[in-house]
Image (tube, rainbow, N blue to C red):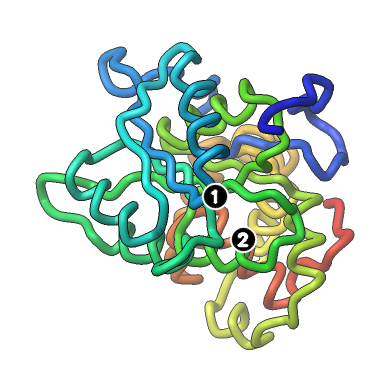
Amino acid sequence: MIGSDPGEAVANGPDANEAVATGAGTGPASTTGPVGTPVTLLIADDDEVTRSGLRMLLAARPGIAVVGEAADGVEAVEQVRRLRPDVVLMDVRMPRLNGIEATRQLLADSTDSAEPPKVVVITTFENDGYVTAALSAGASGFVLKRLPVQQIAEAVRVVAAGEAILFPAALRRMVAARPLGSAEALPNAALTGREEEVLRSMATGLSNPEIAESLTVSLETVKTHVGNVLTKLGAQNRTHAVVIAYESGLVVPGFAG
């Protein structure tokens, strides 16, 4: 049942279900879109019961307007192009076109007049091998279907504000179940020692202000390092950079900072 356990709180700590919002900002994520307008959301899931339940529950949350649904990846791409939502809540295992390919298409589909939406992967299992592929395709984060609806709603708001949702422990476990990628990925990126430190901190879910405090540098310096890391790794966002860090072996499952 979607969001059935109110005891699964999002809080700082080592639990695998705990989400960490990371981004450049120093304050809480906005609960609405530009100039106070609601965040517009499209829900893509091939299970009609799940899709309808999410729509009903999320539409009742403040600051969110559910503008459409899609039963598969093809329909999701078509609906996004027509409705231009701020965020897509994307299941990964769908017919015709899975959520990974749909995410890849959506994030490549930008024009001068319309930026692509943010994508949040929603899945039943935290060890779903598709999730890391979707994050590598550019999704801003992922949530579990069993999380309380208020946490799913907050994830939507957070990514709409330009941040990312990470479940560090769950991500470590997912990557641990996958073969490591080429260890040459990071050496070829020519990261400096400080940039590697910043990337390791990102992998534990630290926000930019927390990284600045831990390294005793200014927030602007951290932002510069994060930007350099993303550019050198060819990462679409910081979530993708964390996936690369794990898969390259720079950060190993179980790493805690």
Residue 249 position in % (x across, y down): 75, 76
Locate residue 242 relative to residue 36 in the image: left or right. Answer: right
Which residue is under mark 1? 121
The kind of residue tagged 1 is: Val
Q: Residue at x 55, y 29 (%)?
A: 53
Locate the N terminus and report the quarter of the image it occupies. top right
Picture layout, residue 257 above or below residue 59: below
Which image quadrant is residue 127 in? bottom right
Contact (Cβ within 8 Å) of mark 2 with mark 1 = yes
Label 2 residue SS: helix
Q: Residue at x 41, y 21 (%)?
A: 64
- Give 241 or 210, whichever is nearer the viewer: 241
- Give 13 or 68, whichever is nearer the viewer: 68
Which residue is under mark 2? 131
Which class describes the residues within 10 Å of circle 2: few (<14), some (14-19), or many (20+)?
A: many
Picture layout, residue 71 above or below residue 85: below
Give how far apart the Cα atoms at labels 2 and 1 are. 7 Å
Q: Residue at x 69, y 41 (%)?
A: 206
Label 1 residue SS: strand
Residue 37 position in % (x across, y down): 29, 16
